[in-house]
Amino acid sequence: MVKIDQIELPDFPLLLAPMEDVSDPPFRALCKEQGADVVYTEFISSEGLIREAAKSTMKLDIYEKERPVGIQIFGANLDSMLRSVEIVEASKPDIIDINFGCPVKKVVSKGAGAGILKDIDLMVKLTEAMVKHTHLPITVKTRLGWDHDSIRIVEVAERLQDVGCKAISIHGRTRAQMYKGHANWVPIAEVKNNPRMHIPVFGNGDVDSPERAVEMRDQYGLDGAMIGRATIGNPWFFKQVKHFINTGTHLPPITLEERVDAARRHLQMAIDWKGEKLGVFETRRHYTNYFKGIPDFKPYRTKMVTSDDSKDVFDTFDEVLETFAHHQFA
């Protein structure tokens, strides 16, 4: 069993990574149904929260069926982060996660996300202050370091633990790498193998197959896997990984009926949450992966991603079900 503070999780839990414009309530609900043990919101700007920006406050929406759920915030200003904690607490998440890993320029340029990897003392100071400011467990998501020459993640993780961080998720790339090259899990294993570490250490980056998840567990000894891009348009990834862990075999391919049902439910939940216009628009990014591998699918995908009317998209789902009824997924 793995514990984040008092939250009990199964052995080698699978966590849905916070992903901008992806990890919203409809998508989290689908992933939870398919076996995600913990889900995280999209990252939320602390400055946006304290200014009550609509886009930021909407991301605070969480639902009982998602639990345990973490709300992730980012920022580099201590007062703003502490005020954000108070706002986040009102949504009653199970966990507050701090993003110290986002490599995107507009975040980093403000000293937030992975930008804080240039100032480890500030990173520790912010974490300590937030731990003292809330009764909720504080966890951290970060990267190996700013660049190859500044990888100090063993020291960083230990210092974060010492000020009360309850779990750490580490992406196996530096900020300089962005999402290029391959994730290096060796330094994450060094964090886990540090005899002073007692909080869960979760690996992140390039967990793109059930075999890789097992490798993260068996060869690197990590406590769990935080999975991001492999789940986009594929919420079944959690179920596939768990089945492989338990049996050593792969599940049969997801059927067309299951894919259409997930796409349909995803769109409907998005509309129920965000309204017609935003719901239709923000679900588009998932369709390519939901229907990956179907030959001559382009005209149908084009309809799905260009129509502004949900009825047209739902009708296209029905067409797909009829046209490709005999397609066998590999």
Image (cartoon, helix red, strand yellow):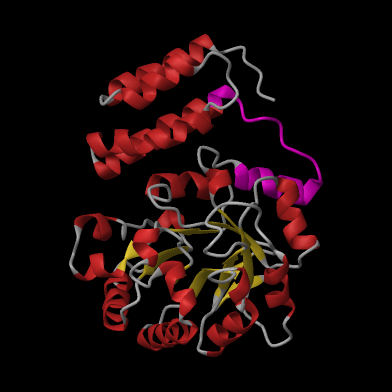
Outermost residue, front direction?
149
268 or 127, which is in the foreground?
127
170 or 202, which is in the foreground?
170
42 is within the stretch colored magenta: no
Position of the N terminus, as image quadrant, is bottom right
Number of numbered labels in the structure image: 0
Query: Magenta segment, principal secondary structure?
Result: helix
> x%, y% of residue 154?
65, 80
Whether residue 245 sits left or right of residue 15 in the image: it is: right
Position of the C terminus, as image quadrant, is top right
> x%, y% of residue 171?
58, 63
- The residue depicted at 29 percent of the width and 44 percent of the height is 273
- The residue depicted at 50 percent of the width and 11 percent of the height is 322
Q: In this view, does 6 lie above or below 41?
A: below
Res 79 visible: yes
- The residue depicted at 74 percent of the width and 86 percent of the height is 195
Kindly indicate the quadrant of the structure image that contains residue 197: bottom right
Q: In this view, does 166 lie above or below 17?
A: below
Whether residue 225 sits left or right of residue 323 in the image: it is: right
249 is within the stretch colored magenta: yes
Q: What's the magenta region?
A: 237-257
Whether residue 189 sits left or right of residue 206 in the image: it is: right
